[in-house]
Amino acid sequence: MIFLKKIKKSRQKFFILPPAQLANKIVRRYGGGVILLALVVAGSFLYTASVMALAADSAGAQPQSIQAEAEPDDLLTVQFIPNDPDLPEQYYLSQVNIEPAWDVATTSPEVVVAVIDTGVDIYHPDLSQNIWKNEGEIKDDGRDNDHNGYVDDYQGWDFIMQSPNPRPKFGGETSALGINHGTVVAGLIGAVGHNNFGIAGVDWQVKIMPLRALNNLGTGDVPTVIAAINYAIDNGADIINLSIVGNFTDADLAAVIAKAYHRGLMIMAAAGNESSPLEVGDLTLAPKYPICYDGDDNYVFGVGSVDYHDVLSEFSNYGNCIDVMAPGEYFYSTSVYEPVFKEYQKLFGGYWSGTSVAAPLVSATAAIIKGLRPDLANKEIYGLIKDNADAIDGENPGYQGRLGGGRLNVAKAVSAAKNFKGNAARLAVAPAGAHAPTVQLLDGSGVVRLEFLAYAENFRGGVNLAKADVNGDGSEEIITAAGPGGGPHIRVFDANGRIISQFFAYETSFSGGVNLAASDLDADGQAEIITAPQSGHFAEVKIFDYQGQLKKAGLAFSGRFAGGVNLAVSDINADGQMEIVTARSEGDSQVKVFNQDFKEILSFYAFPGQASDGVKLTAVNLYGDNRTELVAVAAGNYEPQVRIFSPAGNLENQWPAYDQSSAYGLNLTAGDFDADNEPEIFVSQAAGGSNDVKIFDFHGVLKKQFSGLDTGFSGGLNVMF
């Protein structure tokens, strides 16, 4: 069910009718005139039965146009106002304090907002430039080029008709509400701004992903909405706008929303409208969905509606599922243009009311913040929007504490985001085995900020990890390799879990797993990807660029050795050149260090006469000097010790990371997790062990401990800082 109401505009042409409340305010300010507004309820619409607006001074001046910006003391002096001619119709932009926000940011060209709705007019001249394009798909060639299960989904998908055309459909029973709803929402989010045409969206340049999941009347079923949400997750959406609501909970819908949230998406949902006094509007007592699918971490950001005076709209729900209120009355926006039908011969129209139009203002605000600060997590952006809303309890006696954080203030939220010190994702974890190939990114508090699948969900061989800026864009990418049982499949993901590139490091028939490291070996600003077999292959180490172009290769151990090789990279001898550090993954604990031409420069045994299942290692400057230490742990059934070696291979320190009975083998990485300018050592148990990650200083003092993946998981973790 969708929640939107329409106020028909007066047919008189000598003025522009602003919102009723704003018009009254203007008339009072100018000391004269009358507004006669009679409303009758007809189903889900409100119709203007009689409207006349007059503005006159005491000398009997003639009627004059009334513009929504006629209150001079409500305007703010700003640097930049768009030239869209219908901007005066958009009173709500001033109410949410948009103008100062536009001085900070007007666009977020790489942010994708999925509009799951009744379809979007993708050819609308004020929207077409901002419609998302699936770069992996060739338009109209009849093929599923990107292998995502949808043929020719170049600009979204129609989940009702199973069609690549996500526009509203005119066959069968229709309503103006059902046809226009998604296009109205899309225009509020991202109508092209400052193009001297039509209106301006809150976000002038953003990628709107149109997903049609509701029919011509504005209704739909849960499985169709679930399919659309899954599409948004899998195809790169950052935000999902759900201007829809239902009365009944559904476990599958709740699960897919949790999935979207944990993949880092933001889900903005309308509160819903209770048009009858007999219905309960308090979501605390009568929850609606999806707005109330908050899970254990506020998965859904709920949006209610207020009028121009910040008073709760008479139709809007309220209660504990609300995060913020936004204007939701008398909106003017883009309309579906289909001139063969008399009702659809206008590109713009109004006036619309409902929580359906309040929610997209918040979605667009989140998009601007995401574009400005792509490093921020969904939870952080939720908090910025809610914590910087304007208090409106004074305007709403009797509703204190039930209107979320208050009324949306875009400028305050964007300004706060600009200066916000986020708790950035620092640690990547993935299963060593016996689990779906989920990669989690954790912040400095050990909180999961993002998770995504590196490979097919049914793969259980584990995921090996590396992190580095491989494409020179200034941000670290996450590199994954499939463990035993998978092909030698390397994938590179951006910080939002989207695939950038992929290739095979060894012959496609090889299934022994691949180990990884990554570092800028040639100092060109783009890190190379270094691979080695995990087992069952001669010990060939390869160096690739991120697109899979082989640059160098060499043997770490004798050609007869096929036990696998573990990797690290660092400038061990402080000569300004990065070295490749290798260790056997079975047989003994030998460590070898090579220059980039695979000339051996150091060899030693990390656990002499012991650790027959090999060694895992990392390299890090622990003491802040110009040396790089080597940190090693036993990879298999040996006591769970951490050992620190000098660049010459001399043992400097050691301590037990786990109880001596926990002989599962260990994984490790190192880095400055808590931003105190001193690197920490991260240790986790290998396959068969617990899901605990322990963080030590270089003296062996435990600083922090937390769990990754699922509670009770015992397949072991791979970790990478």
Image (spheres, rainbow, N blue to C red):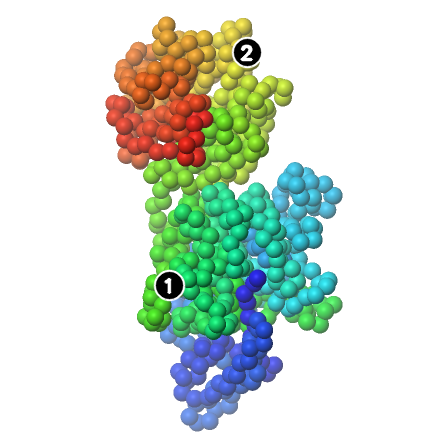
Q: Residues within 10 Å of mark 2 (few under 14, many from 20)?
A: many
Q: Nearer the viewer, residue 201 or 361?
A: 361
Q: Residue at x 60, y 48 (%)?
A: 227
429 over 101 or under it: above or below: above
Q: Earlier in the sequence, mark 1 or mark 2?
A: 1
Tell me whether circle 1 and circle 2 mark residues in contact (CB < 8 Å).
no
Kind of residue at disc 2:
Phe
**Which residue is located at x 58 percent, y 76 percent?**
42
Quarter of the picture containing the C terminus is: top left
Horizontal relation, residue 149 to residue 439: left or right: right
The crowd level at tag 1 (other Cα within 10 Å; few <14, some 14-19, many 20+) is: many
Residue 208 rendering spot, x and y as whole percentages = 57, 53
Percent of width and height locating residue 311: 40, 71
Q: Quadrant of the N terminus?
A: bottom right
| Residue designated by label 1 | 402
Residue ID at (44%, 51%): 294
Disc 1 from disc 2: Cα separation: 65 Å
Direction from residue 419 to residue 345 in the image, left or right = right
Q: Is residue 436 visible?
A: yes
Q: Is residue 329 visible?
A: no
When the figure is inspected, residue 132 is found, relative to residue 191, above or below; the finding is above
x and y percent of residue 563 in the render? 50, 11
Mark 1 residue element:
loop
Image label count:
2
Q: Nearer the viewer, mark 1 or mark 2?
A: 1
* Residue found at x 50% / y 14%: 564
Residue at the disc numbered 2? 538
